[in-house]
Amino acid sequence: MPLDLSYPAVLDQFGRHRVPGRTDSRAFLGWFLENYFRLEALTVEDSICDGPDDKGIDGIYVDDTLEVVYVLQAKLLQNPSKTVGDGTLRDFSGAIQQLTTPEGVEAVANSTGNVELKNLLADADVAAKVKAGYEVRGILLTNAPLDANGLNFVAAHGAITAYDADRLQKDWLPLGDTEPVEKEVTFHLDSLGHITYKTEAATAHFVSLRGSELVQMAGIENQALFAWNVRQSLGRTKVNRAIASNVQTQPEHKNFMLYHNGLTILARTVRLDEENDTLTIDQYSVVNGAQSLSTLNEKKDSLSNDLRLLARVVELDPASDLAGMITRNSNNQNSIGARDLQSNSVIQKRLKEDFNRSFGDQFDYEVKRGEASSAERVITNEDAAKVLLAFDLGQPWSCHQSYRYFDDLHADIFGRPVVTAGRIVALIAVRDAAIESLAALDNQLVARYSVTPYFLMYLLKQALKIDDVGEEFCKDPGAFLAEKGFAAVAAVIKRVTDDLVVDLNSEIEEREEARNPFDHKRELKSPTAVRALKQAVIPIYQKAVQRKRATSFAEEWNAAEPSEPA
């Protein structure tokens, strides 16, 4: 469904970014950074400085992967007949120019009365980044189209990207969730009573429902009923087996509600008929209790009217912000971890939709435990986190800390505009190559250690930076994937990682001879030790390339034949 970018309809898109005291243009920029740059909420807030004396700079975002300082400006036009021309763009070009030198950055910081801008320049260390050679680029955001003069100016300027109405429509990536299930179901309350609790935003009914009627809800078989849950059914877990055992034991049916947590059902339509003692729902989703309901459905022939579950039926839109809060705070019978909670985050949903759009049945992206997939290969968001953490962020020593991927590191790993389906798939090809190359490592205890492939990816990135083509791969591996395919990327990378393993063998052997053995279990988890090992290995590889004992990435890539299209 296309976006309605006309004013005031566009304001409905801004959701939680539109709050009292915040200008519409500021909300527009926040919505853009979340949905197009894919930044975490906190990063979005920290990147915006739109306000008095902002020097024409509405926001700044520093991308350390691409080494780019993005200068942001938002123009929200109310007149649908208006377009954006070169006058606006010339003014914006002048604002960008202020930050193209370290001295200019410091001058803006010292002269502005905008505290947010001053702090943003300092916290992002913009002056140092510009001095280090970071590119300074402008992003002009507008809900209107650019006219011919505007388009010509952008094309000639070279350092401005315009997200106008046409670009916003073209790049819009919807969340891709299924709609709530539409099939009216009526439950008999059997004179057991109910509790109704009302707030301004929702009405909740606490009721005891027959298991035999719960399994009449549509969408259990194909899991559509649980699309808004933080995870799908997990299959044969210990908890599910216990539920199945209780279902098959008829005398236990009357006690079932006493030792199971029950369900949370969100529905757009709820009708409580006190005269007939029934509750009817339509357009619904189960956001808590997928395990219990899936198991009941499997054993539905054994259900009796004595088997009941406590249910919280909440009347509201399952796509609303409140529904998301209910989902995140509900208790499931299988424990929920940070990964489960992040599965419904905008960032993870958009990545999943990006995979669907970019790769179809070739690669799928698993964000929820227990998801079914027909793809040739499934990449979990845990695997994605590890390759991004090792290669992009240069932290292989953290790759074993899985509890952090979707907690304190989630924004750093996933909340960056460069993190796309293409980038993740390309880096999975890199990891595959690293694992293959490690078969030649003399010390197989080191080779098979879970952190070692990610350490090798870290070394690889340093090696790739030796030549210009390798440097481009580091910035956009997805482009290389699109050019020659998954197998070609893996094959070329393997030639480089093969050489690095040879050099790593030499380093480990020298340390053994010097009676300073490589303690991989400690050293691969130490930033200091990993960096020291890099300083020992990379110069050896660099000399080998210079002396033609090893081929560079550029040579290997240019000679490679395309494989299957990615």
Image (tube, rainbow, N blue to C red):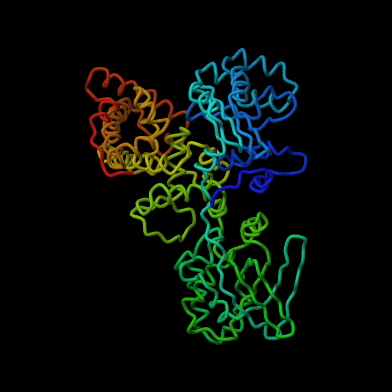
Q: Please say if 190 is above or below 73.
A: below
Expressed as whole percent of the image width and height from the top left, the position of residue 74 reads 64, 32
Q: Nearer the viewer, residue 404 or 378?
A: 378
Q: Residue at x 67, y 43 (%)?
A: 7
**In this rendering, position of residue 30 left or right of residue 504:** right
**In this rendering, position of residue 507 left or right of residue 76:** left
Q: Residue at x 59, y 79 (%)?
A: 256
Which quadrant would residue 120 be assigned to in this image? top right
Q: Nearer the viewer, residue 160 or 457?
A: 160
Q: Please say if 552 is above or below 355.
A: above
Expressed as whole percent of the image width and height from the top left, the position of residue 263 reads 61, 70
**In this rendering, position of residue 531 left or right of residue 247:** left
Count of numbered labels shown in the rendering? 0
Q: Please say if 203 is above or below 464.
A: below
> Which residue is at the far front?
81
Which quadrant would residue 30 be assigned to in this image? top right
Expressed as whole percent of the image width and height from the top left, the position of residue 358 reads 40, 47
Expressed as whole percent of the image width and height from the top left, the position of residue 115 reads 73, 26
Q: Residue at x 26, y 26 (%)?
A: 555
Q: Residue at x 51, y 21 (%)?
A: 157
Indicate the quadrant containing the C terminus: top left, top right, bottom left or bottom right. top left
Q: Nearer the viewer, residue 158 or 207?
A: 158
Which quadrant would residue 200 be assigned to in this image? bottom right
